[in-house]
Image (spheres, rainbow, N blue to C red):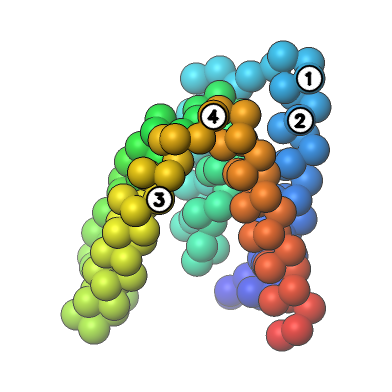
């Protein structure tokens, strides 16, 4: 049984939007995630990734709550994504779900994402940490709204 994509879009969209005011509340109270929070959050996100196609945006608030900014954020997000997608690829290949055509499309998509990260890195490293966090808030709000819009129109 597959989860309805509309319900997943709504859940992730609402989650991303809710994380923006939560991040500000945590910052106001000088609360930050600890390493064990990253481990628990990573386990939950890893599990969700096994049952939902795309959970990439879910790690963004977790890394921001930990206090990562700029280059550290980009590097951690990239390493996390690489580990996640290599393990998914191995699993899908083992169970026969990763055909050569799908693998090629994945390599093309992954290459474009890597190129985008390299291009963005130049701009991100120039940002002040507070500006970076505000940009990330904007990205999470737009991504959440986009997911809600997608769920409403499909």
Report how far apart the C-alphas of labels 3 and 1 lie in the structure.
28 Å
Give the residue pinned by disc 4: 128
Classify the position of the N terminus by image quarter. bottom right
**Mark 4 in CB contact with mark 3 (< 8 angstroms):** no
The image shows residue 42 at horizontal and vertical percentages of: 49, 37
Residue 142 appearing in the image: yes
Q: Secondary structure at mark 1?
A: helix
Image depth: mark 3 or mark 1 in front: 3
Q: Secondary structure at mark 4?
A: loop
Label 1 neighbourhood size at 10 Å, few (<14), some (14-19), many (20+)?
few
Image depth: mark 2 or mark 4 in front: 4
The image shows residue 95 at horizontal and vertical percentages of: 28, 69
Q: Secondary structure at mark 2?
A: helix
Image depth: mark 1 or mark 4 in front: 4
**Mark 1 in CB contact with mark 4 (< 8 angstroms):** no
N-terminal label among 1 and 4: 1
The image shows residue 60 at horizontal and vertical percentages of: 55, 43
Report how far apart the C-alphas of labels 4 and 3 lie in the structure.
15 Å
In the rendered image of this protein, does residue 103 appear above or below residue 144? below
Residue 63 appearing in the image: no
Report how far apart the C-alphas of labels 2 and 4 lie in the structure.
17 Å
Label 4 neighbourhood size at 10 Å, few (<14), some (14-19), many (20+)?
few
Give the residue pinned by disc 3: 120
């Amino acid at each position: 049984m597959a989860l309805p994509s509309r319900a997943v879009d709504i859940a992730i969209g609402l989650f991303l939007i809710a994380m923006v005011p939560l991040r500000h509340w945590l910052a106001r109270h000088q609360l930050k995630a600890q390493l064990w929070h990253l481990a628990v959050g990573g386990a939950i996100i890893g599990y969700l990734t096994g049952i939902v196609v795309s959970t990439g945006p879910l790690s963004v608030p977790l890394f921001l709550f930990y206090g990562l900014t700029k280059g550290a954020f980009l590097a951690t997000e990239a390493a996390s994504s690489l580990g996640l997608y290599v393990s998914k690829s191995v699993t899908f290949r083992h169970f026969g779900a990763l055909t050569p055509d799908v693998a090629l499309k994945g390599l093309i998509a992954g290459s474009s994402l890597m190129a985008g990260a390299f291009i963005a890195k130049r701009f991100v490293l120039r940002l002040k940490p507070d500006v970076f966090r505000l940009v990330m808030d904007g990205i999470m709000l737009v991504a959440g709204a986009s997911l809600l819009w997608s769920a409403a129109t499909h």
